Image (tube, rainbow, N blue to C red):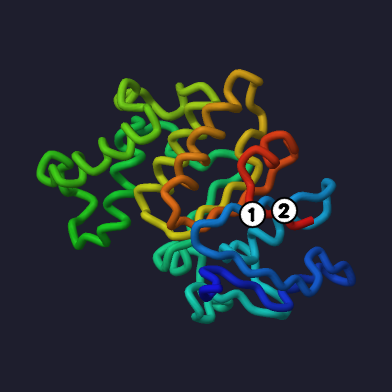
Amino acid sequence: MSRPVLQTQGLTIRFGGHAAVNDVSCAFHAGSLTAIVGPNGAGKTTYFNLMSGQLPATSGSVRLDGEEVTGLSVAERARRGIGRAFQITNLFPNLSVAENVRLAVQAKARSAASLWSRWDHHTEWIDRADLFLEEVNLQDKRDTAAAALPHGDKRKLEVALMMALEPHVYMFDEPTAGMSVDEVPIVLDLIKRLKAAGDKTILLVEHHMSLVMDVCDRIAV
């Protein structure tokens, strides 16, 4: 088997005397979708936070593409290819849908352009952002403020932001949380399409077991 894209070895975090994540070793490969399941309080989100850098590990390591990233910041891990979606959407609520994605495109480009640059002076950013909006079927809402979107569309926009950063690892933390029954298939379809590309490593924390069984290759409990 090929080298894991993302791997944890003995990953542990303690809060006082409590081990929230205790000595977890797991490997995740390109083209695979792994669901991480367990009861509330089992440490699933904390494990995600350790891998993506939101929390510092007490011990153990995180490796990305074979390189140690345990001591790196969230931003640096994102730059190296870890994309993370949260239980609560993280968007710029007062910016339009298109502006949210353009900021992610600009971040990926790591351009030296200043914040005072006009968007219409960077048509390549606009064109690329529009491509990602088409991928998640939000092009008809490109001028809508993110705050005005229904919950399902906010989830779609968050996926577009991740796609704009072009990660090799996609981490979804309860992507259907707070969704109506009608909205769940929207995000499920997006995850299926990412998986169908065949070159992404996808991790999913989810309580809807029917969804988990429908899309995952492996379940870690």
Nearest the eye: 140 or 19: 140
Residue drawn at 51 percent across, 40 percent down: 192
Residue drawn at 27 percent across, 52 percent down: 106
Report how far apart the C-alphas of labels 2 and 1 lie in the structure: 6 Å
Q: Which residue is mark 1?
A: 34
Q: Is residue 128 left or right of residue 64?
A: left
Q: Is residue 15 left or right of residue 129?
A: right
The residue at the far top in this view is: 182
Q: Position of residue 164 (x, y in %)?
A: 35, 48
**Element type at marker 1?**
strand
**Element type at marker 2?**
strand
Label 2 vs 1, first from the N-terminus: 1
Amino acid carrying mark 2 in the image: Ile
Amino acid carrying mark 1 in the image: Thr
State if disc 1 and disc 2 touch (CB < 8 Å).
Answer: yes
Q: Position of residue 28 (x, y in %)?
A: 59, 65
Residue 3 against residue 148 in the figure, above or below: below
Quarter of the picture containing the C terminus is: bottom right
Q: Which residue is mark 2?
A: 219
Residue 202 against residue 23 in the figure, above or below: above
